[in-house]
Image: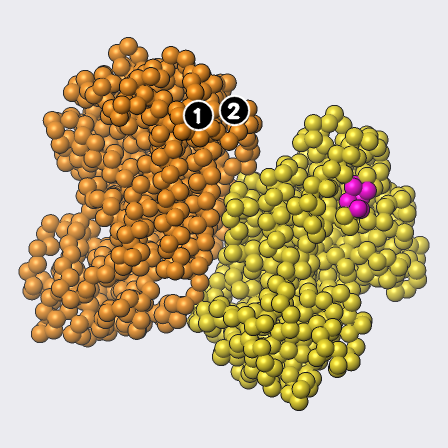
Chain colours: A orange, B yellow
Amino acid sequence: MTTTILVVLGIVGSAARAEDGYDLWLRYRPLHGVHAAAITMRGSSPTVRIAAAELARGLSGLSGARVAESPDLAAGGILLATARDPMVAALHLPVGPLGNEGYLVRTVTVGGKRVTLVTANGDTGLLYGSFALLRWVQTGGALAGVDLSSSPRIKLRLLNHWDNLTGTVERGYAGQSLWDWWLLPDFSDPRYVDYARANASIGINGTVLNNVNAKADSLTAPYIAKAAALADVFRPYGIKVYLSARFSAPIEIGKLKTADPLDPAVAAWWRAKADELYRAIPDFGGLLVKANSEGQPGPQDYHRSHADGANMLAAALAPHGGIVMWRAFVYAHDNPEDRAKQAYDDFKPLDGKFAANVIVQVKNGAIDFQPREPFHPLFGAMPRTPLMMEFQATKEYLGQATSLAYLGPMFEEALRSDTLAKGPGSTVAKVVDGSLDGHALTGIAGVANIGRDRDWSGSTFNQANWYAFGRFAWNPEISSDAVAREWAAMTFAPNAAVVDPVVRMMAGSREAVVDYMTPLGLAHQMATGHHFGPAPWIADLKRPEWNPVYYARAGKDGIGFDRTASGSNAVAQYAPAIARQLADPATTPERDILWFHHLPWNYRMKSGRTLWEEMVADYDRGIASVASAGRTWATLEPQVDAERFAKTAAFLRIEERDARWWRDASLSYWMSVNGLKLPAGAAPPAHDLAWYKAQDFTYAPGNP
Amino acid sequence: MTTTILVVLGIVGSAARAEDGYDLWLRYRPLHGVHAAAITMRGSSPTVRIAAAELARGLSGLSGARVAESPDLAAGGILLATARDPMVAALHLPVGPLGNEGYLVRTVTVGGKRVTLVTANGDTGLLYGSFALLRWVQTGGALAGVDLSSSPRIKLRLLNHWDNLTGTVERGYAGQSLWDWWLLPDFSDPRYVDYARANASIGINGTVLNNVNAKADSLTAPYIAKAAALADVFRPYGIKVYLSARFSAPIEIGKLKTADPLDPAVAAWWRAKADELYRAIPDFGGLLVKANSEGQPGPQDYHRSHADGANMLAAALAPHGGIVMWRAFVYAHDNPEDRAKQAYDDFKPLDGKFAANVIVQVKNGAIDFQPREPFHPLFGAMPRTPLMMEFQATKEYLGQATSLAYLGPMFEEALRSDTLAKGPGSTVAKVVDGSLDGHALTGIAGVANIGRDRDWSGSTFNQANWYAFGRFAWNPEISSDAVAREWAAMTFAPNAAVVDPVVRMMAGSREAVVDYMTPLGLAHQMATGHHFGPAPWIADLKRPEWNPVYYARAGKDGIGFDRTASGSNAVAQYAPAIARQLADPATTPERDILWFHHLPWNYRMKSGRTLWEEMVADYDRGIASVASAGRTWATLEPQVDAERFAKTAAFLRIEERDARWWRDASLSYWMSVNGLKLPAGAAPPAHDLAWYKAQDFTYAPGNP
């Protein structure tokens, strides 16, 4: 049962090659004190062979010596075997709680030999355990005495690729789509395998291949064949393929006159389509749907509800074990209601009306992936419906490729928010992991930041957001800081001289973006369309909620969106205790204060400063934080390879300039509105407001 | 004067890494019998340092041992010094004829030591000589006794990138644009350096960065700064930067009311723009203009001639030494004349009317980069005007990324065509190299096939077209076969067991495309827009010359475009002896016969077959050629690395399927027109005509 791992020599030989970021956190560069004897695998499934190969590759690289596979167990070696294997069963290990995907890694004695056992109930667990063992070693752990055990708290841990069939990626800042649709299924890029390895290493077990703003073509036979080719690559890595479905596909590619979910011909068309999908991809995961949102078709076009639409699709998929992920990101152009309220208004009444294989996918906040948003009021409000978290790993509103915004703190903040739905401790994490309301169908989705750029995510530090997304999806109660430490150790080196400063840079990076873009609960002040750079003055777009002025509501009298009873009363969508807290600016967390309140410019903050003074201070703090990260990074030059060092250094310079631009443009505009002077000591903007308004970035990347 | 080459160890260490095509023909893998002592360079310009570093890198890789730089000349070493260096001057070598860019590489004795001297009159020549020496070794030549000397026959050897500011590439099949406009000038991708190395290695000395279908934005200050950053990278590699200019830029970014070339304000605007360009890029090359063609603005919008437009721009550039490349690829939607005649009609009368720093850029054929075209009648027809050849290295009409069409034979065929303009021997090459009419301003442009794909050109064999373009631009009378041998030896291995079969595959590959797409002089039978796949039936596009039926003119009575006196009389645009030859099908080369003649289906070919039988045989021959290439490639599996082997194997399977599709779709259509049966023994099409007509490829890459 040995497989010769031909790749090993190549990897060992490559230790000296230039670091271009391609290896992600799976670098496996030699570390002092790592030794491993042979790897013995029991079983021969593709997944087990992949796990063994990864261990051989990783331990060879980390030890700087070839670690081969061997049919015979060696003392000091690795044993890779499921819990059913007689060798393992005899050890009577606590494998029951591991479930299908969990793993246990422990030093054991088998046949008189001390070995590191990687075990699990299933093959995918063995793969996850192998990566866990490698992570342990990569982060400085010793093989001797290793004892790791973990199983995922969330069932569906999915990337959402907003990748278009044309090869562009909506909100993508890392080059073209990874999927070479044109050459699939005839040619399978070797990169697909490395994508699967990276995902498996962090427990991601599904990928939605195409943009939620979907083309019906992705459901035609040629594109199903292309998706099937990808599914074949990903399957042994424990990764299922999903597709975004265009609700009107029965019209566009099915030649029906309607897509009405209650029309029997429509339901029949989707049943046939589901059958076709499962013939090509027997373990197809299911469909993700953006309906009746931002111009996408949906059941409301036929005066049917979201539940009618979702359940019709769910019925087509159910016989095959497929699921429907139905997005709650909806707002209607003809609805004058506060945009932040519309999803709740639409979905809350549907609680309990969705089929068992439907999960409603809810963004972390009620607007749209802002640098900071309070948690979405739907969390905790739909106890009879499984809710899936949708995070955005790509930084659409957070500086895109160039800002160093580590999103771990944002994931953590959202997941630790307490909905109070069933009393204190009813955190969003417990809604999402199903424990609060007893749901077995659970999920977290991350809008991918992955493209064909050599370093996958557009920058080294953007890779951390892919990594962190996976780690939070596995365990929504993990610590953002711990994840950053892991990632830094694996991506650079597991020593404090590197990890400490890198983690320090990461820890404050998202807060810096909040500060220099949208402090104190401001939101959606970005430029139109591409969302890059400041444009708080925009007021002339057709739909009111497309305009930054809609969100900031700045005037002579003050700034902020009144979402209390005197305003839109969005606060009433939260649990009563939260609603009460948010009804009063004095008890509202100041970080969210302008999200919920319209306050005079001279409102007195807890710091003793006026609101205006505080805003200016926040912008400046954001800039200072980026500048500080730049100085920290500069000290790391001796310890980071030249190519990755230079790119991050350039990006930090760009971010610092952008932060100043954000601050100066925003302050120029606020001063034009409030007529106030800058607080004493604050630097005047570099240009006048007209200059900032004249900035134009027609070719900014990532547009739909 | 030694520079430590830190990169060397990395390169040597990387010998075992996976081959993904990134290294192009500069692989420098160890070869038996290569030994070199140290490299001694004289001088310290960036270009000389780059040349020395490349020699160190290359010879270290090729010898498998570190070859370092040394200030002291070593026996068996390399001496890199210009001809002015006293050490070299003392040798009295024939360096006069080398000009500015030529080189001489020869074993000499200096100070009692036998060394390999790389010399030239200028630093760029040293770089070219260094690459020539490396090529010599890479193709199996021995260092001892090396004697190479060459100088370019063409002054401007330019890539034309049809790269858009959005990052897409018109007619690009190798991923996004190399230029990361969004991050320039703040971040310089290390890949730009490798692009410059590859170009310098084949003598390319200029690059037009943006699409000829230009946006005026590329001439704004931010984009000039971006271009300047690229120019800074490319400069030490002897590569100048050029831009495509939109003729109406004075209106779009200059706020003028007109772009009339005779308007003084317009001329002043361009003068100021030229001044601005040269402030940012002191060695800026000049402007490329597509005017009054396919919807682009131009001087004819103001009832001025192409010469008026070109000369106005030329006057702005002249004080700085810049040039204007004015494209002759024009045809007008309101001109009922044979499209093949229109460029000649427009430009021939302007001969002698262009300023001294204008060169007219003419495609190799009169239509548009078809698999085969007769040479463009403008060559030889404008003796008082420098004419620049425009080839297309990207395979817009030749199967795009996946076909294995080596274009060396096409370049060779076009350049060896005899215009007879000044009697026999007046080849296109002699028009282009200036020798026929005594022009000093000479140029060849190649529309680049380069993108951000890891292997640069979308496939290993597509790299050969980049390589061949450079080699033909250096010497338009080089042999296509010799170029293929060089490339194959460098790209795979310099032994006959690899080179012979690879060159055999390449030699017939373009002819195969002609055969299975457009045999016997047919043209433009490709699908609309993206130009991928067959669509000979298309007849409903707005402009007549956009329709394949315009070119094939197939009917019950026959097929082909009558360009004799009974038809459009395009033949009269050639020299009289050629015109006479082409006036008669019997004396017209059969490979071009349907380009010039409309012939009955039963026209008797030289083979004895009818035209119809011959066409069918040609389609089948094309398929057989691709199938044969596939079989040849399969035999090379043991000798080619796995990744490059698999991709080419997949692409050959795709091409064979596409070749059958072309044949079957075309024959189905011709049979629907001519009512004939297939010749005995010919396989019937796999589907009926309706099936072929229904094929649709909305997302084919490379659309404008």
Badge 1 amino acid: Leu
- Quadrant where the image shows the C terminus of chain B: top right
Question: Which residue is at the front of the view, B158 or A627?
Answer: A627
The 10 Å Cα crowd at callout 1, few under 14, some 14 to 19, many 20 or more, is many
3D distance between C-alphas at marks 1 and 2? 9 Å
Q: Read off the magenta span.
A: B313-319
Q: Amino acid at mark 2?
A: Leu
Spot occupied by residue B92 in the image (x, y as percentages of width and height): 78, 80
Give me the disc on residue A667: 1
- Identify the residue at image location x=53%, y=51%: B188
Residue found 27% across the figure and 14% down from its top: A564
Residue A513 visible in image: no
Membership of B317 in magenta stretch: yes
* Magenta region includes residue A260: no
Residue displayed at 78% across by 41% down: B316
**Residue furthest to the front:** A680
Q: Tag 2 or tag 1, which sits nearer the N-term?
A: 1
Taking depth in this image into account, of A703 and A538 the one nearest to the observer is A538
Q: Which residue, given by chain and number where applicable, does mark 2 sit on?
A: A689
**Residue B489, position as x, y percentages in the image:** 59, 73
The answer to which image quadrant residue A155 occupies is top left
- In terms of depth relative to the viewer, which is nearer, A35 or B21? A35
Identify whether B35 is placed above or below B303: below
- Magenta highlight: main SS: helix
Q: Secondary structure at mark 1?
A: helix
> What residue is at 46 percent from the left and 22 percent from the top?
A669
